[in-house]
Image (cartoon, rainbow, N blue to C red):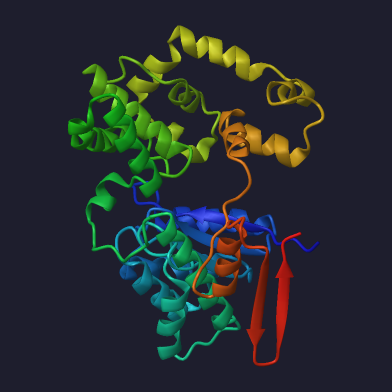
Amino acid sequence: MDLEIALALSYTVSPRHTDEYYAQKTKELAEMKPDVIYLKDQGGLLTVDRIRTLIPIILENANGIPVELHSHCTTGLADLVYMEALKLGVRTLHTAIPPLADGSSQPSVLNTLKNAKYLDYDSNLDIERIQHASDRLMSMAIQDNMPIGAPLPYDYSQYVYQIPGGVISNLKHQLKDLGLENRLEEVLEETVRVRENLGYPVMITPYSQFVVSQSAINVATGERYKVIIDEIIQFAQGIFSEDSGYTWMDQNLKDKILSLPRAKQLSRVSDENIPLHKIKEQFGGPDLSDEEFLLRYIMKGNQEIEAMRKAGPRKKYFSGTSPLLQVLDHLNKQPEISHVQIQSKTGSLVLANV
């Protein structure tokens, strides 16, 4: 099996994420000799002006390694940014298939191809198959009453809070459970201060969750950092590497965190060299495959995985592109029908329920 190694360079906006920063990080990634380096704009923060200055820097320092672009439509600018990236020399753009495109997702592959065509760029993609997949997914979404991705208006608040769409949706749900949904704006404003206090970590998993969780606790308790989550303590200890931003942390806050009794406990745990088989025991035992173990480890336990498996076999979906399957499925549920004859111009087929 052929594997392609793609290393991501996450984009964000802060005083420490300068042109020099991205030039140095691109060099560091290039030294690892990956097949691809891609600029990951998880918050959809790139603008046309910024891509014009940033892509040339990355291309210059990529040492000939192909550079790709991955952005989200959160601020409503990703489609424009993608076309500008093409003009600057990027030849691979990360897209999504409707109805999973737009919204807080990636730009639509169909719309991106249409726009690129007007700039005289072509692709080797099978548009007919992609359109068929899109129609199928759209039918599934409608049957399950799921949201359909749609373009979003320009949202400048994203540049203030820089919270990914998935994180903010979870935050709203958690605040509602706590009866604090009316304090969402306070939490959002607190995330700006917490991120600055922590040295401007990139707002991407896991840092975005750390920042948002600590901000919500600060607002809920009415006193900043009265209660500090373990992940923020570990952040201050530097276990997430220098690039997390912890060396830029507010020194008074760092001193406060590192002096906590809990910091000493976590430090002892992090110093332990726990054998792999011991960790596997926590998630199901030594017979777990590597893939299953990694899945459970990433999910922080077995609860969600077991719930998924208890849900039973996958649901069957039918669409206008498969009317015969719909008819047969319906007839199969009628016990009084024992024979079905299907007639076409070229022949007939008799199905018997025996």
Where residue 343 sits in the image (x, y, percent)?
65, 84
Residue at x-position 58% and y-position 73%: 324
Where residue 233 sits in the image (x, y, percent)?
46, 21
Residue at x-position 36% and y-position 24%: 251
Q: Looking at the picture, tell me which residue is in the foreground, 272 or 33.
A: 272
Where residue 259 sits in the image (x, y, percent)?
43, 11
Q: Can residue 198 be seen in this view?
A: no
Give the total of numbered labels: 0
Q: Looking at the picture, tell me which residue is in the foreground, 179 or 84.
A: 179
- Where's the N terminus, which quadrant? bottom right
Where residue 56 sits in the image (x, y, percent)?
47, 71
Residue at x-position 46% and y-position 7%: 261
Q: Is residue 1 visible?
A: yes
Q: Is residue 215 left or right of residue 290?
A: left
Quadrant for residue 222, please give it: top left
Relative to 283, say whether 353 is above or below: below
Q: In this view, does 243 lie to the left or right of 353?
A: left
Quadrant for residue 211, please give it: top left
